[in-house]
Amino acid sequence: MRKILIATLLLMCGSLAHAQFMPEKFTPMGEKIEAAMKSDIRTPEEIARDGERKPRQTLEFFGLRDNMRVLELIPSGGWYTKILAPVLADKGELYVAIGTARAIEPMIKTVPALAKVKVAPTDAKFVPAAGGQMGKFDLGDFTLGVKNLDLVLTFRNYHNLTPTARASLNRAVFAALKSGGVYGIVDHTRRHNEPETAENWRRMDPVLVIKEVQAAGFVFDDSSNLHYIPDDELRYEVGRRTVTGNTDRFALRFRKP
C-alpha cells in the first residue's frame, strides 16, 4: 500500500512539473499578438510593461482579429499602436485619432512597420479645460472622419477629458462603428461616487463610465478583471512612484446595437 502511495505521489509530482514547464498555448490570434509584442520597433522600456499591462489578454478580451478595421484613440507615444500595427498590417486597417501630431505622426513617417497606420481625418482638437487644470481637455462636437469600424480602443486616457468632452467622444465613436462594432475602454479605477480631487483626477469611476457610454447608445457587453490589483487603495495619484504600474484598472467592453 505504501509503495502504491509513493508511486502515485511521484506521478503527480511529475505531472505538475511537466505542466509547469510546458510552453503556454495561445490561440492563432494570441500568437499573432505575441509576435507583435516581440517586434523590434518596441523599446525595452515598452516591453518591460507587458507584464502589468497584459496586451495580449486585453486585446483578446476586446475581440481583436487581424482583418478588422480598428481605431485607437489618443494613442500618446504609441505603446499599443506598435502592437496593433503589425497584427493588422496584412489583412486589416489601423487608424489613430486625436493627439497624434506630436508622437505618432512622425513615427508613421519614419518607422516602416508603422507605414500602413492611417491618421483619421477627424476635426477633433484638444482645448484646455476651463479653469486651466493641466491634463484635462474639452473637445466640442466633432466626427472621427471614418465609418464602419469594427473596433475602437482607448487606453488610460478617458480620464483626461471633461464630462462634456467624454460625451462628445462617445457620440463620435458610436457614429464611427458599424452595427455590432466594439468600443473598448481601459482606465485607472476610482471609487464609486467619490468626488474628484487632486489625488484621484486621473482615475475614473467605472460605473460612471458605463452610464456615460450607454447614454451614447451603446450596450454594455462585458467587463474584465485582468487588471484588478487588490493592493491598490484607489486613493493616490497614479503617477506616484509607489503606485505607477500597480494601479487597479477596469477594462470595459461595449457594443453598438
Image (spheres, grey):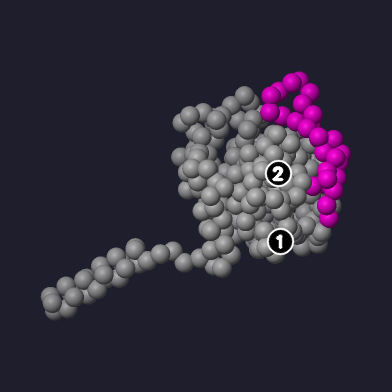
* Rendered image: mark on residue 128: none
Q: Position of residue 196 (x, y in %)?
A: 66, 29
SS type, badge 2: helix
Q: Quadrant of the N terminus?
A: bottom left
Give me the residue at 60% from left, 30% from top: 200
Identify the residue under disc 1: 92
Asked if residue 249 is among those painted magenta in the image, a careful observer would answer no
Give me the residue at 66% from left, 43% from top: 110
Categorize mark 2 by other alpha carbons within 10 Å: few (<14), some (14-19), many (20+): few
Asked if residue 132 is among those painted magenta in the image, a careful observer would answer yes
Q: Nearer the viewer, residue 90 or 168?
A: 90
User: Disc 2 residue type?
Assistant: Lys
Identify the residue under disc 2: 109
Q: Nearer the viewer, residue 194 or 149?
A: 149
Q: Quadrant of the C terminus?
A: bottom right
Q: Is residue 44 visible?
A: yes
Give me the residue at 63% from left, 39% from top: 77
* Magenta region: 120-147
User: Disc 1 residue type?
Assistant: Gly
Q: Is residue 219 left or right of residue 207?
A: right
Q: Position of residue 194 (x, y in %)?
A: 63, 33
Which of label 1 and label 2 is nearer to you? 2
Categorize mark 1 by other alpha carbons within 10 Å: few (<14), some (14-19), many (20+): some
Give me the residue at 79% from left, 23% from top: 130
**So how many labels did they put on this image?**
2
